[in-house]
Amino acid sequence: MNSRTVGIGFVFLAAALFGTLGIFGRVAAGIELPMGTLLSVRFVAATAALWFVLSVYGPRRRLEKRTVFIEVGLGCVYGVMSVAYFESLTWLSAGIAALLLFTYPVQVTLASAVALDEPITLAKLAALIAAVSGVALVVGGGELTLAVSGVVLVGLASMCYTVYSMGTRVMTAEIDPLTHVAYTFLGVTATVGLYGAATGTLGTPATIDGWMLVAGITVVGTLIPIMLFAEGLSRIEASTASIVSTSEPLTTVVLGVILLGETVTLSIAVGAVLILSGVGLTSPAIERLGHHEWMPYS
């Protein structure tokens, strides 16, 4: 199994685990756990765990101050993304918010072609169209209700995810993924902590259910997938990773059916097939067949 295939597999698994965040968010609302509390405790716990693992198993390497500044800055971008996305749910349905957020593969693909010199192959273009169309079908089946504030927030989240993905691709070319994630999470935690303090929701869960929810979202929805994502991006292009990540809503849909009794419609089924087809089109074998490139600036 070559490095590219492993990278795609890592990002696919990361997307599946990130897909649990929607379920955790719904459960948090159900037990009236403030979003600021959930996010702040989640990232504080995740950062502490990452630095413990780094101190025990990580490479003994000191980063230059400039590199640390960039890493923490990327973390701040990720923190803004998390806050903006969860806040957008105040004005938008989860489906519409997810649909708007998952326009980011288009942004990543085009921006990476210009800034990172990543080619847009025919296979990648076909995968992008299939994946984004599939996301539209999976999460866009509900009533289309838009609010300007929500659209602006989720648009900001999408742009932040684009910056974080491209930044991670650049940084993991020189820094091992564990070190990268540990430093970026310092910025994430600081940003989310400021958000919680500003909104007056900074605190700790008051119930056992709240603590169990925080433990689940920290381990399953944060630590494991963010490490898998960074490991994957150290092996594949940022544009390819963004396309593979469109499989994330599938986890949310499947868990919604299993845990919340939601139904599977025809549009969801067709969308799932399109998303998985898009992921399949990013495979090394397909890329070799569709080796022709199309560059937007040629």
Image (spheres, rainbow, N blue to C red):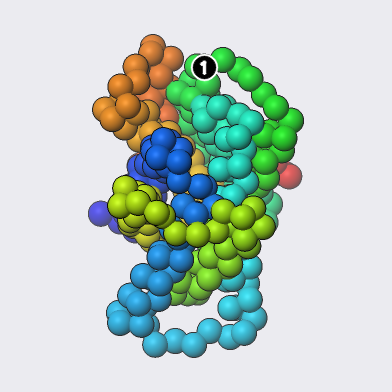
Quadrant that contains the N terminus: bottom left
Foreground of the two, 76 or 283:
76
**Is 87 above or below relative to 256?**
below
> Can you tell which quarter of the image residue 252 is in?
top left
**Residue at which label 1 appears:** 142
Q: Is residue 61 visible?
A: yes
Q: How many marks?
A: 1
Identified at 40% across, 76% down, the residue is 51
Image side of residue 80 versus residue 45, left or right: right
Foreground of the two, 169 or 163:
163
Identified at 68% across, 33% down, the residue is 151
Residue lying farthest to the top in this orientation: 266
Identified at 43% across, 15% down, the residue is 267
Q: Amino acid at mark 1?
A: Gly
Image side of residue 131 versus residue 284, left or right: right
**Is 270 above or below relative to 168?**
above
Identified at 60% across, 78% down, the residue is 67
